[in-house]
C-alpha cells in the first residue's frame, strides 16, 4: 500500500489549529490510515488506494480537520473560467482517446510540496491509473507553454527533450533507452503512431502516458501550473483531475478551467454528486439509533455536505471521493464521523447449532489414529520446488502444475504428492534423535486433461536404523483397519523412490497408494544416511 | 543402604570380595559379563570410591628358538646323559660325543660337568650319575606348557634358575606389558559384604534419582492445535463449517467480490495463476451475467469472461463463502471456513506464500455492524484476548470495513488481527443474496505466533523436530 510522509510542522500549519502530536497520531487510524513509522518530526502512514485523495498530506489534513471538528462539510472546488484550451485531434481515438486539464495559478511551491506532488503522481499512476494504463498525469510549468495545446499523434521519429534529459530524443529512442520508456513502452507498442501534446509553437510538452518534456518541468520557481491527464476512460481522467485540483487548491493555488474540445472530449466540470440516504437503513446497518441531525453532523465530519429531509438525508459528495458508490459507502462515512470508538459491540441473537465439516471430522480421526501409532504430525506447504518434488525423488514430472511468476523458486510447483516433502522434512532434521516417525495429511493437486483435481492424501515415513518394509506395512494395515475398518493388499510394483523388491502398490479395491523402502540414492539426494520406509495413500474416496 | 547399585556393579563387587587384584579380563571370566560392561562397571565403582584401580607393568617370558628345541629334544646335557646311558660301559670318546651332539656338545659338557654328572678322563667321557629332572628342565616345561601364551615371571618364582636359562643363547624371550588390576577399597569391602547379604531383596531397585532416557510423544502439529482451537470456538458460537477447493476461478476469487479485472491485487505480482489452466464452468448464466453487469456499471470497463475463467490459487477463503451463499441464498446463516490461502509474496519472517485463514459470516435480516464487533470480541475473549479496539479500514468487497486491534500482554503492544465488514451490495445483490452479510477473517499463523512467542512465521512450517517435540501443548 502507498505511503505518505506527514511532517508535524507542515500538518500543523495546514490544519490551521494547534493540535498535539499525540492527538494527531491517535486520530490518524480513525480516518482509515495505518501508521507505519513514527519519529520525532514525522509519521509515515499507509493508505488504501481507494482513497486517492490521501495521496498527499493536504488530502489527509482535510479529513483530519473534519474528524477533529476544525472544518466540516465538503471542501468546495472554486474553478474560475480560464481562456486557455486544448484541442483534440481525432487521431488519438484508437490509442488514448481522452484528455482533460486544469490550470492552477498564483501559487508557491516549496521543496516539500514538490516532493508530495511527485509521490502523489506516482501513487495515482499506480492506483486509479492502473499503472498508467487507464490514466496518466502530466504536471507542467504553465508559463513555459503557449496555448492552445493540441492533443494529437505523431510518428515515432518525432523528437523532443524528455524529462531529466539534456538532449533531444526520438520517441523510438525514448522507448528503447529511457528507463520510463522501457517500463511503460508496452502501453503504446500496438500503434504505429504515438500520442503527444504540442503547444502552439510546436513544442512537445508531453508524450503520454510515458514521459513529459524537460522544457515544462516544475520547480521551486513555478507559480502557475498546468495539469493534464490523458486516459482511455473519461470518468477516470476527471476523477484523477479532481483529486489533484483539490490538492492544488489546498496548497494555495487558484484554479482556472481549460477548455477541451474535439473528438468527443469536453471541458471537465468536476461537479459534486448528490445521493439520497435512507436514515433508517443507517441505523439498521450500524445497529444504532441516532437522530438525523447527528447523522448530518457525522457526514459533515467526513467532509461531505448533508441536509436532512424527512427521513432522508441529501448528501453532496465531492468529485474526488471516487470511493463512494452507494448508500453503504455513505453509511461508513456516518460511522467514521460518529466515531468507531463510540460503538458498543453487541451479540446477534441466534439459536443456530454449529457443526464441523465431515472432512474435518474424518481428518481429526485420521490424526488421532496416526498419533496413536506413534507418528507425529508435520505441516508442509502445498507450493513446493521442482527439486524436492521431482529432481531429488526422480518422480515423473509430466503432469506438473506450476504457477506463473512465483517470487520464490522454492515455491512454484503445486505438489502432487506429500512424500517428497516428508523426506525433505527428515533431511532438515538429521541432527535430531532417531527414530523419526512423521505423517502429514493435506491437499495434493492433480492435472487431468487440462483440468485440475484436488485430493486429500496421507503420507507417513519412519526413519531409523532398523526400519523395514514390514514395519511400515504394519502401520498401513493398522491405520486402515483402525480408521476405516478396511483391509488392503500390497502388490509388487516399481517406483522411482523405492528399492526394487521392496516397493508395492496399495489396493483397497482400486489402487489407493504406494508403499516401500526408499532407495539409498534417493535418501542420499536429501543428505540422509538413515534408512527410511514410508507410504502415501489417497484419503478422498475412503470416507 | 544409601546407595543403589546396578546389577553389573553388584556382580563385580561380589567377585572382588572373593579375590582381590583382578584384571578386567579376569572379571569377565568370573562374572560372565562382557568386557564393555565390566569396564563401565569399574568406572561407576571407581567414581563411587568402592574400588581402586591400579595400573602396573608385568614381565612375561616365553621360549625362544633354542628353548623350543631343547624342550623337544631335551637340554644338551640331558641329551649327553641319554647318549652315554645307551652305550655299554657308560663312556665314550670325546670325538664320539661331539659327533652325536654337534653344536650342543660344548654346553652339554659344561652343564653336565657343573651338575656333577660326568667326568673327563684321558679324552673319554664317563657317566658318573644323573638327576631325573633339573630345576632348569622344570622351568622349561612350565614355560612350554603355556606355549604359545606367555608366562608371568612372578608365576615362575625360581629366579636363579631362570637367570641360568637366560644365559643360554636364544632360549628365552622377555616382554613387558602394562596391566590393570582392580582392588576393593575399604568402603568397597563393606559394601560388597552388604551386597552379598541383601542383593536378593534389592535386585529390582534402581537409581531413581538419575535421568532417564528421553522419549518423545507422538503429537499433532502446534499450528494444527491452534487451527482446532479456532474451529472449536466458531462451532461454539453456532457456526457451521464449509470447505472448498484451494484452486478457484478468478470469477469466485475476484469478480464475484467486486474486484475489477484491472485491479492491482489481481496482477501476477500478488496472485498465483496456474500456468495454462482455465476453469470450464464457473457459475450459472445468471450469476455470470449479473456479476459482469455490476462490474461494467460500477467500474466502467470492458469486463471479459475469459479473464474470470483463469484459475488461481485462492487468495482468501471468501471465494468459498461467497459461492456457498450464491448457490444457496440463505436468509439466515452462520457459516465459517478454515483453509490454506496463497499470496505471491517474497518469503520472509513476515510472509509466506501460503497460510491458513479463518473466515466467518453471518447472514441475517437484522444483523448490524455492532453485532460484527460483538462477535469479534466474543471470539477474542475465548482465545484469551481481553483488550480489543476497532479501526476503520478498506476491503474491496465490504463496506463498512473495520480492522480489529488486540492488545498483546507478552509484547506489550497492540497487534492487528482480523479484518471485517459487511458485504457490499455490489457483491450480494447480483448473486441474489438479500440480507446483509457480516464477514470477518484473518490469518491463523499470526495467532499461533503470538501464542508460541515466535517472531518468524517460517518457523511454523520448518517442521524442526527440536521444536515440534519440545514445545508444550498447553499454552
Image: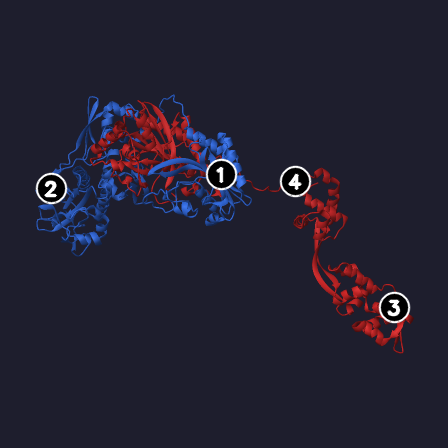
Chain colours: A blue, B red
Label 2 vs label 3, nearer the camera: 3
Does the image show residue B462?
no
Task: Give the labeled residue for mark 2.
Answer: A258
Task: Give the labeled residue for mark 4.
Answer: B206
Along the polypeptide, which appears first: circle 1 or circle 2? 2
Label 1: how many residues lie within 10 Å, few (<14), some (14-19) or many (20+)?
some
Task: Confirm whether circles 4 and 3 share one chain.
Answer: yes
Residue B229 lies, in percent from the top left, at: 44, 32
Is residue A339 shown left or right of residue B382? left
Which chain is disc 2 placed on?
A
Task: Confirm whether circles 3 and 1 share one chain.
Answer: no
> Which residue sits furthest bottom?
B122
Label 4: how many residues lie within 10 Å, few (<14), some (14-19) or many (20+)?
few
Task: Give the labeled residue for mark 3.
Answer: B86
Q: Quadrant of the C terminus of chain A?
A: top left
Labels 1 & 2 near each other (Cβ < 8 A): no
- Judge whether A497 appears above or below B420 on screen: below
Label 1 vs label 4, nearer the camera: 1
> What's the mark number on residue A491?
1
Amino acid at each position: 500500500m502507498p505511503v505518505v510522509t506527514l511532517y508535524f510542522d507542515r500538518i500543523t500549519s495546514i490544519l490551521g489549529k494547534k493540535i498535539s502530536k499525540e492527538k494527531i497520531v491517535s486520530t490518524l487510524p480513525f480516518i482509515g490510515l495505518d501508521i507505519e513509522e513514527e519519529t520525532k518530526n514525522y509519521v509515515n502512514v499507509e493508505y488504501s488506494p481507494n482513497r486517492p485523495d490521501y495521496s498527499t498530506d493536504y488530502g489527509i489534513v482535510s479529513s483530519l480537520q473534519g474528524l477533529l471538528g476544525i472544518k466540516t462539510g465538503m471542501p468546495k472546488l472554486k474553478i474560475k473560467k480560464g481562456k486557455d484550451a486544448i484541442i483534440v485531434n481525432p487521431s488519438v481515438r484508437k490509442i488514448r482517446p481522452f484528455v482533460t486539464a486544469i490550470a492552477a495559478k498564483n501559487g508557491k511551491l516549496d521543496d516539500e510540496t514538490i516532493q508530495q506532488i511527485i509521490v502523489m503522481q506516482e501513487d495515482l499512476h499506480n492506483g486509479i491509473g492502473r499503472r498508467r494504463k487507464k490514466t496518466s498525469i502530466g504536471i507542467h510549468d504553465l508559463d513555459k507553454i503557449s496555448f492552445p495545446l493540441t492533443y494529437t499523434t505523431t510518428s515515432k521519429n518525432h523528437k523532443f527533450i524528455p524529462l531529466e534529459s539534456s538532449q533531444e530524443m526520438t520517441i523510438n529512442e525514448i522507448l528503447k533507452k529511457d528507463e520510463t520508456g522501457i517500463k511503460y513502452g508496452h502501453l503504446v507498442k500496438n500503434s504505429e503512431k504515438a500520442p503527444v501534446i504540442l503547444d502552439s509553437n510546436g513544442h512537445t510538452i508531453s508524450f503520454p502516458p510515458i514521459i513529459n518534456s524537460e522544457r515544462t518541468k516544475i520547480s521551486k520557481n513555478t507559480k502557475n501550473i498546468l495539469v493534464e491527464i490523458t486516459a482511455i476512460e473519461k470518468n477516470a481522467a476527471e476523477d484523477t483531475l479532481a483529486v489533484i485540483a483539490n490538492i492544488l487548491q489546498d496548497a494555495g493555488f487558484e484554479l482556472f478551467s481549460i477548455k477541451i474540445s474535439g473528438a468527443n472530449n469536453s471541458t471537465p466540470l468536476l461537479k459534486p454528486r448528490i445521493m439520497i440516504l435512507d436514515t433508517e437503513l443507517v441505523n439498521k446497518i450500524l445497529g444504532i439509533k441516532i437522530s438525523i441531525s447527528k447523522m448530518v453532523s457525522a457526514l459533515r465530519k467526513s467532509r461531505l455536505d448533508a441536509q436532512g429531509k424527512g427521513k432522508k438525508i441529501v448528501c453532496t459528495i465531492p468529485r474526488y471521493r471516487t470511493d463512494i458508490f452507494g448508500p453503504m459507502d455513505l453509511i461508513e462515512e456516518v460511522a467514521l464521523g460518529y466515531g468507531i470508538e463510540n460503538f458498543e459491540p453487541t451479540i446477534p441473537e441466534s439459536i443456530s447449532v454449529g457443526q464441523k465439516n465431515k472432512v474435518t471430522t474424518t481428518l481429526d480421526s485420521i490424526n488421532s489414529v496416526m498419533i496413536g501409532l506413534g507418528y507425529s504430525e508435520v505441516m508442509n506447504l502445498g507450493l513446493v520446488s521442482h527439486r524436492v518434488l521431482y529432481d531429488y525423488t526422480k518422480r515423473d514430472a509430466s503432469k506438473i502444475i506450476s504457477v506463473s511468476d512465483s517470487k520464490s523458486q522454492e515455491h512454484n510447483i503445486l505438489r502432487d504428492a506429500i512424500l517428497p516433502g516428508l523426506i525433505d522434512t527428515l533431511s532438515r532434521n538429521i541432527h535430531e534423535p532417531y527414530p523419526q516417525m512423521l505423517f502429514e495429511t493435506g491437499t495434493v493437486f492433480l492435472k487431468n486433461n487440462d483440468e485440475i483435481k484436488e485430493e486429500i492424501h496421507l503420507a507417513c515415513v519412519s526413519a531409523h536404523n532398523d526400519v523395514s518394509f514390514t514395519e511400515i506395512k504394519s502401520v498401513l494395515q493398522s491405520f486402515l483397519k483402525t480408521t476405516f475398518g478396511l483391509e488392503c493388499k500390497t502388490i509388487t510394483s516399481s517406483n522411482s523412490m523405492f528399492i526394487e523388491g521392496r516397493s508395492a502398490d496399495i489396493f483397497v479395491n482400486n489402487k489407493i497408494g504406494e508403499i516401500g523402502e526408499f532407495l539409498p540414492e534417493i535418501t542420499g539426494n536429501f543428505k540422509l544416511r538413515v534408512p527410511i520406509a514410508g507410504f502415501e495413500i489417497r484419503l478422498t474416496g475412503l470416507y | 543402604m544409601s546407595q543403589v547399585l546396578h546389577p553389573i556393579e553388584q556382580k563385580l563387587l561380589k567377585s572382588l570380595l572373593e579375590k582381590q587384584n583382578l584384571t578386567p579380563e579376569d572379571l569377565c571370566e568370573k562374572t560372565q559379563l562382557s568386557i564393555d560392561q565390566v569396564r563401565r562397571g569399574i568406572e561407576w565403582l571407581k567414581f563411587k570410591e568402592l574400588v581402586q584401580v591400579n595400573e602396573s607393568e608385568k614381565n612375561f617370558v616365553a621360549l625362544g628358538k633354542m628353548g623350543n628345541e631343547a624342550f623337544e629334544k631335551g637340554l644338551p646335557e640331558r641329551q649327553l646323559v641319554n647318549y652315554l646311558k645307551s652305550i655299554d660301559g657308560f663312556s665314550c670318546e670325546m670325538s664320539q660325543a661331539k659327533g652325536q651332539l654337534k653344536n650342543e656338545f660344548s654346553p652339554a659338557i659344561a652343564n653336565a660337568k657343573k651338575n656333577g654328572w660326568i667326568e673327563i678322563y684321558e679324552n673319554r667321557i664317563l657317566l658318573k650319575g644323573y638327576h631325573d629332572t633339573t630345576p632348569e628342565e622344570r622351568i622349561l616345561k612350565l614355560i612350554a606348557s603355556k606355549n604359545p601364551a606367555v608366562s608371568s615371571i612372578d608365576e615362575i618364582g625360581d629366579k636363579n634358575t631362570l637367570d641360568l636359562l637366560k644365559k643360554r643363547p636364544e632360549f628365552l624371550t622377555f616382554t613387558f606389558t602394562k596391566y590393570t588390576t582392580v582392588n576393593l577399597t575399604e568402603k568397597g569391602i563393606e559394601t560388597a559384604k552388604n551386597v552379598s547379604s541383601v542383593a536378593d531383596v534389592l535386585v529390582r531397585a534402581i537409581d531413581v534419582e538419575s535421568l532417564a532416557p528421553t522419549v518423545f510423544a507422538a503429537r499433532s502439529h502446534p499450528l494444527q492445535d491452534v487451527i482446532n482451537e479456532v474451529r472449536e470456538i466458531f462451532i461454539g458460537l453456532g457456526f457451521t463449517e464449509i470447505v472448498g477447493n484451494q484452486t478457484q476461478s478468478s470469477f469466485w476469487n475476484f469478480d464475484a467480490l467486486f474486484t475489477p479485472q484491472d485491479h492491482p491485487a489481481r496482477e501476477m505480482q500478488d496472485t498465483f495463476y496456474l500456468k495454462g489452466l482455465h476453469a470450464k464452468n464457473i457459475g450459472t448464466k445468471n450469476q455470470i451475467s449479473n456479476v459482469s453487469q455490476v462490474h461494467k456499471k460500477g467500474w466502467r470497463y470492458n469486463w471479459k469472461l475469459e479473464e474470470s475463467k483463469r484459475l488461481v490459487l485462492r487468495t482468501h477463503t471468501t471465494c468459498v463463502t461467497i459461492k456457498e451463499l450464491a448457490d444457496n441464498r440463505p436468509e439466515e446463516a452462520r457459516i465459517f471456513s478454515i483453509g490454506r490461502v496463497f499470496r505471491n509474496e517474497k518469503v520472509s519472517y513476515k510472509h509466506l506464500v501460503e497460510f491458513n485463514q479463518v473466515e466467518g459470516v453471518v447472514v441475517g435480516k437484522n444483523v448490524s455492524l455492532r453485532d460484527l464487533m460483538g462477535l469479534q470480541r466474543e471470539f477474542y475473549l475465548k482465545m484469551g484476548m481481553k483488550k480489543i479496539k476497532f479501526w476503520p479500514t478498506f476491503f474491496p468487497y465490504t463496506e463498512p470495513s473495520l480492522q480489529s486491534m488486540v492488545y498483546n500482554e507478552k509484547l506489550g503492544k497492540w497487534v492487528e488481527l482480523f479484518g471485517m465488514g459487511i458485504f457490499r451490495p455490489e457483491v450480494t445483490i447480483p448473486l441474489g443474496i438479500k440480507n446483509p452479510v457480516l464477514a470477518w477473517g484473518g490469518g491463523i499463523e499470526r495467532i499461533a505466533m503470538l501464542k508460541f512467542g515466535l517472531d518468524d512465521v517460517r518457523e511454523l512450517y520448518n517442521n524442526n523436530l527440536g521444536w515440534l517435540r519440545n514445545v508444550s501443548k498447553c499454552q
